Image (tube, coloured by chain):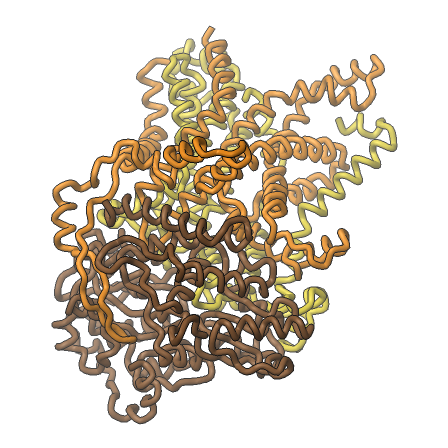
Amino acid sequence: MANSARKGPSSLTIFSTAFVLLWIVIASFPFLWTLWGSFKVQGDFFSKADWRYALNGTRTLVETGGQFTGAGYAGAWIEQEFWRAALNTTIVVFFTVVISLTLGTLGGYALARSGYNYAFWLLMIALVFRAMPHITLVSGYLLPFFQWNLWGHLPTTIIVLVAINQPFTLWMLHSFFLNIPKDLDESAMVDGCTQFQAFRYVIIPVMWPGVITTGLFSFLLAYNDFIVTAMLLSRDNQTMVPAIAGFLGSTFEEGNVMFAVAAVVSTTAPLFVLVMFFQRQIVSGLTAGAVKG
Amino acid sequence: MFHKTLALAGAMTILTGTTAIAGCGLSSGNVNILGNDFAAIQAVVAAAKECASDGVTVESNLTTEHRDLQVAALTANPAQYSAAIVANSSIVPLLNDGLIRPLDDLVAKHGQNLQQNQLIVIDGKVMAVAFMANAQHLFYRSDILEAAGVDVPTTYDEVVAAAQKIESMGLMDDPVILNTKTGWNLGEEFVNMYMGTGADFFTPGTAEVAINNENGVAALNMLKALTEYSNPDYLTFDSNATAALWEGGQAALGIMWGSRGGPILDDEGSTSEITGSTVLAGAPTLMGDNVASTLWWDGFTIAANISDEDAEATFVAMVNGISDNVVKANNDDAVWLSPVYEPNPASAGVAATASAGATPYPMIPFMGLLHTALGAELTEFLQGSESAEQALADVEAAYTTAAKEQGFLQ
Amino acid sequence: MTHRSFLMFILPSLAAMILFIALPLVSVVVQSLHIEHEQVLKVTENCGPFGCKEETTVDAEATAALRAEKPIGRFNGLGTYFDRGHLAIEDVATAWAERTSLSGFFSDLYNLPLYKAIAFTITYTVVVTPLTILLGLMIALGVNRVTPILKGPTIFVSLLPMIVTPLIGSLILFWMIDAQGIIGKSLQFIFDDPELSLKASPPLTWITLMTYGVWHSAPFAFVVFYAGLQTVNTDTLEAARIDGADRWQQVRYVIIPHLMPLVVFISLIQLMDNFRVFEPIVGFSAEANATSLSYIIYSDLRGDTMRFNSAAATSVLTVLGVIVLLLPVLIRTWRDFKGKVV
């Protein structure tokens, strides 16, 4: 494709380049604006008095004496100990992704290789499960979790996130495994391997692109989740998104909006590294997994 | 009573004073506090934690999600939290389910320093101890009112007249702001306005709603008259939005929460021209002397499903948390219900509203259901696509459905 | 695969889903068929910082006795599903019987909370899903032509709308589209209307929410399509070119058929997610002009009094709605599955 592009007519190249540039602006502008605003004070970020304040930093100059201020970052990370939330998010995300993928790979493989009707119905039921609004599920968990003293701990939240994420994980990995030729593991079993050995020695080595793609979506689910983490974690174990929401204040009390803005910007940085690192696998994995639908 | 507390504040400082003893004189017990997450409550909980000692543990979970957790957390046996910090609306679900215990014996034993007016008495039993107050009231810009040549409005008719004059003189577009975001905020605005009619929300002694009448229509029409002088985005305005607009100098007459007064008056986010002329005054009246606002308190309650020993430890720790020293050290973080509290310009509005005879937000078991129905069903009327009567009929229908589901109506 | 080894493989995953989704789902269905007990009320004198007052309270002891008798409440059958907060069959019947015109009937219908929510939910789903797919495809075709060295950063930037937490991402955009915000001001300038506000009128709010929806989901479609493009058979393309197909014809007759299975996959996921639209409504404070099924559930559960029975009924209706919506895709999957067995 890359080669053919160069041979393409120049007007098309111009159009396509212009379109990509436009998209890049649309996709990144809100983020860049937030990045810029995160170094201002709230009066400039909202710029209710005059929208140009956001560009000139009028209030920032008055209140801090400079055009830019790191007060939002200092407040969030040092004063409000946002690093704790970052640490909790790391733990939650790491274990959610690892456990989701472990369970999902086993289950997805089984669903892809079983020709019985129940495999199909399981997939359908998983789809129904995915349709369930999370907030209803979480409200139902509260009482039993409090009663059995499970509430507020990171492991509980991790397991809930894994379970809620299972339907999607199963679907993606199932369609990915469909793409791996059946002959591979069947011939291994003819050679005397058990089903598990066939999976272990034949399938695992070739499944990584699909697993990594599914992992990306598990990651985003756990990383961006608000409802589960806000309702199931105590303050000490809070993750980043509820912490950011907490910075915004409530009806009665003023929050620290700039802390929230700085925190939002900070949470995006690790994702950049992640995407850069995995982009090749993400792309190849998705193809393999999704083509079969 | 509230007014007196504030007025006598200085004089009584000497009479009450607590001495901090390590462990607050407790030998054992587990304390765990659930509450909202803001400066005043953080200070209270930090002081309660001073009671921790060898046998006494004091933990806390301060989160903005506390309202959604409290019922489940206190229903568990033993309860996850020994104390829940509530307001007069959020205490209701705990009372309905009998999840908090009467505090009379504990008040008698350890509550010598509490004021009578801090005790929330329900059916003759002390169920909570209040420590701070709040209300929505008038904020105005003295410079703009002066330029328009109008007096400080004390009734809502005067507010509308003043807004009309400010706008017609070209001093400011959309001079009025209210917290009118669809949902809880809009519901609260109607509740406040309806209070100004002096009528009851429900037929006394029953759960039948009684707002679908001329009083309801009057309250709605006043709300609409006010929103006509508001920014067209008013249905998205919550406290954060109104405070930002006020600090940006975009409004001259606001009905906002007293607890937002401090941050608005400080030197952050606004010019001295705006903060210097911002004055906090009592809530206006609607009909006769009826103040169109509700008073709110924050207080602590103690869970029913815990041991008596833990309950006692919790009570002692919480009383230590709202001691005079805490109030003095954090005077400007809240309007404290304490004799040592020093009133300041940021609390003037709440004090004036209380002394003008405003009544508390009703602690009625089904008030929350009505509030939700109001918040959801009034939008179309304000947008002009529905009559006031239709809007109130919708509220009544939505409330009745909810109340039947909850077993309040048959 | 034998039944036994199938079970061994699926068990951990199945156990997690049964425990945390299936059992709660059963409990949700059961609760949606019940309502709370009668509450025993009494009038008491209550006092506080602002004086004393006669108020109605719940007789907690008497109510607790009723509750202990039947812990899950009173059986109500489908009553909750049919009440005004849900399908409102009585109100719909009245509106139909008393209709003066069809539009009058629809405006009566729109006055009922569930139908109001459904109107927005369905519009949002049917508008956002195809636009997402189209935009995602265009971006993928465009990015595919970018110089290799710039591809990584381009992909990252393209993913940004998806990876910023929706709740916060929509909030930030909400601040930007404010009449005093950068986007709001720009729009006022472009349309030469200083009074223009995206937040005030229902149509503009809907357009804003849908634009956000497309912006937020396009990266998902983009990644999937972009990956699919990497596997397009270059020989086929070459052949098409030799036959004189122009660039557009190549896309139309070679690339799109190749990507068709991906379109099905994206539709499946997007239909389901868009049907549950929630975060943008809260983030954009759009409750006044647009509500969705998920928003109704949220507001039932977030009041001072939690209405779990009502939320449960709406949840079940949402699940049923999703199933109806996905039925065509599901039938296709069933055919594929049967094909696989043979």
Image side of residue A278 versus residue A198, left or right: right
Of residues A20 and B349, the one nearer the viewer is B349
Give the residue at the far right of this rendering.
A10
Figure quadrant of residue B356 = bottom left
Which residue shows up at 55% across the image and 67% down it?
B177
Q: The C terminus of chain B lies in which quarter of the figure?
A: top left
Which residue shows up at 38% across the image and 76% down it?
B289
Instruction: Reply above or below: A285 against A219.
Output: above
User: What chain is the yellow one?
Assistant: A
Image side of residue A243 versus residue C168, left or right: left
Of residues C271 and C61, the one nearer the viewer is C61
Total numbered badges shown on the rendered structure:
0
* Residue B51 visible to an observer of this rendering: no
Q: Position of residue B266 (x, y in %)?
A: 53, 79
Of residues B221 and B405, the one nearer the viewer is B221
Say which colour chain C has: orange
Q: The N terminus of chain B lies in which quarter of the figure?
A: bottom left
Say which colour chain B has: brown
Q: Position of residue C207 (x, y in %)?
A: 63, 43
Q: Position of residue A150 (x, y in %)?
A: 27, 48
